[in-house]
Amino acid sequence: MNSPLFRVRDALRTGPQSLAELARATGLDSDSTALALAHWRQRGKIRRIFALGTAAHGGSTCASACAACRGCAAGAAAPSRDESRYLWLDQDQT
Amino acid sequence: MPISAGGPRRVIALVGNPNSGKTTLFNALTGAHQQVGNWPGVTVERREGRLRLDSGRELMLVDLPGVYSLLGGGGLDQDIARQYVQSGAADGIVQVVDVGNLQRHLLLTHELLELGGPLLLVLNMMDEARARGQLPDLDALRQRLGGIVVLPIVARRGEGLAELRHALEEDFPRADAHLPPLYPPAIQDILSVLRAGTGDLGPLDRLRTLEGLAAVPPEHEQGFREAREAIVDKTGEDAADALAAARFAWAEETASAALPAVSDALPRDTWTQRLDRWILHPAAGLPIFLLVLYALLVSSFNAGAIFQDFFEDSSKALFVHGLGHVLLAAGLPDWSVQALAGGLGGGVSIVLSFVPPIAFTFLFLAALEDSGYLARAAFTMDRFFRRLGLPGTAMVPMVIGFGCNVPAIMATRTVEDPRARVITALMQPFMSCSARLAVYLAFAAVFFRGYGGQVVFALYLTGILAALVTAWLLRRGPLRGADRPLALELPPYRWPGLRSVVLHAWQRLRVFVLRVGKVIAVLGAVLLLLPGIGWVDGGLRGTDIDHSLLAQGSRALTVVFAPMGIGEEQWPAVAGLVAGAMVKEVVIGVMNGIYQRQESADLMAAYREPAIGAELRAAVLTIPAHGREFLKNLTDPLGFANIGDTAASAAAAGADHATLRGLAAGFTDLSAFAYLLFVLLYLPCASTFAALRRELGSRWAWFSMVYSLALAWLLAGSVYQLGTFDRHPSQSLLWLVMVLTVVLVFWWWWRRPGHIAMAETHILGRGPGS
Ligand SMILES: Nc1nc2c(ncn2[C@@H]2O[C@H](COP(=O)(O)OP(=O)(O)OP(=O)(O)O)[C@@H](O)[C@H]2O)c(=O)[nH]1
Ligand SMILES: [Mg+2]
């Protein structure tokens, strides 16, 4: 089925993305993209992560910082601005 | 129940995504004045209104909070809408759709079609669609929706409402047999089998259960299991994903059938985007927000200052001196003239002097609410609030709280996570509401003339900081850990509609003047009438106000306020605080009453020989004088130089602020500021307390009470002690050590684990009214 919901999933599987990037990649308007994200979050398939500003994070955000690093290492473009991205947690089991 | 022309009254509900214009339409059809704003989640309660159609028939129209999906998600506000739609109480549903976001809104249409009741679609915001040159193909849309009525409107300007009223005369035609299937054939078949086996469930309950959003009723365990397995078999996806994906696909297809292909760069979007690049900038966002707030307050102040002296002086000439003269001439006894003219008239005159700055504040606030900036402020705060474990949407109630704390607490219903909601609600009592603004204004007129706007800004900021500290403490203490929601919808910028902004500001101003005016005027009269009874020479006797029980009691209480520099001679200020515990504006009312009484001898002379003509003339002259200054200061829009502080304007004003000055006799600038800080923080007012109790339960309401009292006392005391450190260093040091000890003991107690677990069990599963 070609559904916007699955297009969002496919896009996320290529690496963590921000709302704006997802909307561009899927050709959806940003509100529908946001609703698709809300679905996947409710299904426990994605996590919201925050891009790293240099040394701006204390120990408490370590977990999300690591998630961001993993995202970068996985080949996504380095986050240029401090905005939240969404990470697909698939690995076939959650 | 009243029966009108065509039998019992039909009930029509307005349903739609947040920010689609439901309330605008509701107001236009019923003549109501419910709040409208350009952010999702303005309406958080169900509202009903009557609508008379051209045929003379009457309808009951129901405005609901916005809802994205009937299946689940969102805060309590969305639950309210969902429950209402499902209760079947409405005879027909009008879905309000923002044509600019057709695809997203059609997701809800899909669920409403599944529900199967009479449905009518209105496409709102056609003006914006026209400006973008994107007009939907209405016939194509009607066809894809099985022939239901689809009407284009501009709710804000009343366009298309005649057609809508006409359509409301009849029962809506239902979607007919030509309605294209809502799900792909494979899923549709599975759903039909399931429907046959679970006929006792409503269509939405069936979907919810199938998608794992609701528990499976034991008797249908097998049916649902088989349906889920069949869907995985056919599509390779979980039922929840496959069904949602089908809805998304349907919405996309339907939207593209109705709308010509959208070119990538929309003109409105470039405008919105260009502005957003700054307003949403991660570093500039917060300073911009503070700048906007500062500009709002200082410009309301300065614009208000042009008219403030006019309002004060002329109302005093009329309602105090004039009224007193008339009453004396009518032969009323002196004591009743004092009560009526000094108390009642004096109260009215004080309230009227607040009208200009408050009117401008309301006007600017309403324009801000309608512009789309508020949702963006929430967005930029998101990053910042994240550390407090709060969603950025917690910002919206805080700005509403500047008007009144009660709707702000209601607005926390949009916060999804129950813990975050408790925190957000407990932050609200620290927002400077308009009743507190009245107290600030009275003091600013005396002490801070020339930089009143800045002082008020500082107080607003302190309130925000107190709220943030509270959130931080709650997060470190009993309300740990919460889930942060994801998406935040950003509405497009809209030019605030002049009519709706003015109307909205007027509504609020009227309520403010009536409510506050009543309290202040009546209190003034009562205090002047009360015989002074005091403990004199070992017995209760009649005496003057300075020796009355009220004075004696308040004087005794001034000990508590000594740390913030309030001495015995300021007992009226303390009496004001005690009485003002219930309603903040009472602070001014009580002080006014007492002061008027102390001065009543002077006033009698003014009543006997009033110079009303001269007074009015002088009052009128203050307007051009202040106006010229205002224009001169336009080169300095943020108002570092201010209105009303130069010799020229003070002379023009006749500089008679005696009434107000009397309110604050014995204060220094610093102790006046400490006093205002105390007024800001000390207690939620009675209606705020009631709202907290209703929304969160009485334990949290009482917590808020005790906590804010302690915070007010410690903070106001510390400000005064620090400011006067060099005068009495050892005393100030002692105070600061005491504050530190209290804070440390509190911290230790606050972080006890048992405590945290207790709070945990208490908050979860609470809803409004429970
Ligand atoms: N341009 C334009 N703006 C409109 C129209 N109708 C409403 N608005 C604006 O849209 C915004 C949202 O309107 P509301 O009536 O508060 O929307 P709502 O659906 O009640 O929102 P919630 O209560 O949050 O669910 C406001 O800024 C309105 O001024 C319209 O026809 N054209
Ligand atoms: Mg509304």
Image (cartoon, coloured by chain):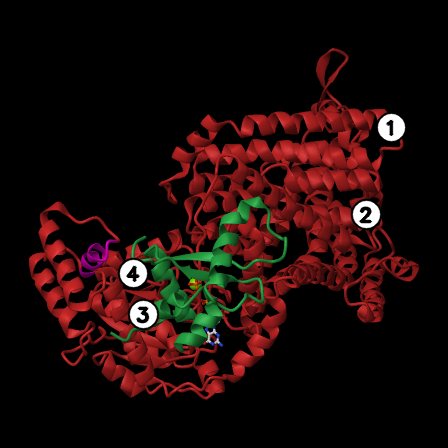
Q: Residue at x 16, y 81 (%)?
A: B178
- Give the alpha-carbon distance from disc 1 to disc 3, as whole Å: 71 Å
**Residue range of the region highlighted in magenta in the rendering:** B203-212
- Give the alpha-carbon distance from disc 3 to disc 2, as whole Å: 65 Å
In x, y percent, where is residue B287? 68, 60
Q: Is A82 positioned to the left or the right of B143 in the image?
A: right
Mark in the foreground, 3 or 4: 3
Whether labels 2 and 4 belong to a single chain: the reply is: yes
In x, y percent, where is residue A45? 35, 57
Which of pointers 2 and 1 lies earlier in the amino acid sequence? 2
Return the chain for callout 1: B
Return the chain for callout 4: B
- Give the alpha-carbon distance from disc 2 to disc 1, as whole Å: 27 Å
Element class at badge 4: loop
Q: Identify the hue of chain A.
A: green
Chain coloured red here:
B
- Residue B297 is drawn in which quadrant? bottom right
Q: What label does residue B70 carry, if any?
A: 4
Q: Residues within 10 Å of mark 1 (few under 14, many from 20)?
A: few
- Residue labelled with disc 1: B728
Element class at badge 2: helix
Determine whether the beta carbon of the residue marked 2 sits less than 8 angstroms from the nearest atom of ligand 1.
no
- Work out whether B495 lies above or below B657: below
Q: Is B216 positioned to the left or the right of B510 in the image?
A: left
- Image quadrant for the C terminus of chain B? top left
- Image quadrant for the N terminus of chain B? bottom left
Return the chain for callout 2: B
Cβ atoms at labels 2 and 4 below 8 Å apart: no
